[in-house]
């Protein structure tokens, strides 16, 4: 069923639109109306050239072509907007799917041999290093990983929670399936009320290859 401008303007806007437009998202609706515009433009052209005698066709040709041009451009704009919206929606869904997959994959990461080392920076300041091993128990390669470090005081209250990059394979590669890698993260400004014990470490974010 093709919707004409007269139907949309004069008749039953709400009921008519509900009858011709399915319950779909905005990009699909734009695509639907753009196709209606193109079909109506073609029908308008056919009706125009058959409705007037030859002596009046030349006088009205310019105004018709101008109206037809705007109608066609409007339909083309709606079509481009619809296709762009569909592409953006697909990209958004792809990012969501990738994020959900990475979140689920975190259960395949095993942390072990977590320890604490003390050193000095180039400026002579005290630096504490949290180090350990990370193993990929899954079947995908991981090329970036962030860990969250939770430091507590003597009352077991959290005094610092901070996420740091622990693995970052640049230029290709990654932590392959069933492989183990070492990590070491430096902290040079820890709270004074920290209890000086090994912090709690958990996987906060990974990026799969």
Image (tube, rainbow, N blue to C red):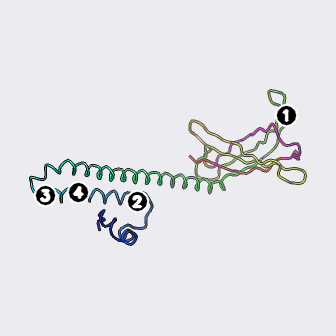
> Picture coordinates of residue 64 (x, y %)?
21, 51
Q: Report the span colored magenta.
A: 178-197
Q: Between label 4 and label 2, give the one nearer the viewer.
A: 4
Counting residues from the N terminus, which is met first, the one under dot 2 or under dot 3?
2
Q: Which numbered disc flags the more N-terminal residue, 1 or 4?
A: 4
Q: Is residue 136 above or below residue 123?
A: below
Task: Give me the residue at 82% from left, 35% from top.
Answer: 127
Q: Which residue is mark 2?
A: 28
How far apart are the two marked residues, 4 and 3, measured between alpha carbons?
17 Å
Q: Secondary structure at mark 2?
A: helix
Q: Residues within 10 Å of mark 3 (few under 14, many from 20)?
A: few
Residue that label 1 marks: 126
Residue in the foreground of this view, choosing between 120 and 87: 87
Whether tag 4 and tag 3 are in contact, CB under 8 A, the answer is no
Q: Which residue is mark 4?
A: 42
Cα separation, mark 4 vs mark 2, equals 22 Å
Q: CA distance from mark 1 to mark 4?
A: 78 Å
């Amino acid at each position: 069923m093709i919707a004409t401008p007269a139907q949309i303007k004069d008749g039953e806007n709400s009921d008519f639109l509900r009858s011709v437009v399915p319950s779909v998202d905005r990009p699909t609706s734009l695509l639907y109306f753009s196709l209606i515009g193109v079909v109506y433009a073609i029908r308008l052209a056919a009706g125009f050239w058959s409705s007037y005698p030859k002596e009046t066709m030349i006088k009205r040709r310019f105004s018709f072509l101008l109206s037809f041009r705007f109608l066609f451009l409007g339909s083309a704009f709606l079509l481009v907007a619809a296709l762009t919206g569909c592409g953006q929606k697909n990209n958004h869904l792809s990012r969501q799917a990738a994020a959900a997959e990475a979140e689920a994959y975190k259960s395949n990461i095993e942390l072990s041999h977590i320890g604490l080392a003390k050193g000095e920076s180039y400026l002579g300041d005290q630096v504490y290093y949290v180090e350990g091993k990370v193993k990929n128990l899954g079947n995908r390669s991981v090329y970036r990983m962030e860990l969250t470090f939770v430091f507590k005081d003597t009352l077991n209250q959290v005094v610092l929670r901070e996420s740091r990059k622990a693995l970052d394979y640049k230029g290709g590669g990654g932590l392959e399936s069933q492989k183990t890698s070492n990590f070491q993260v430096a902290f040079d400004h820890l709270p004074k009320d920290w209890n000086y014990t090994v912090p709690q470490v958990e996987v906060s974010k990974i990026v799969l290859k």
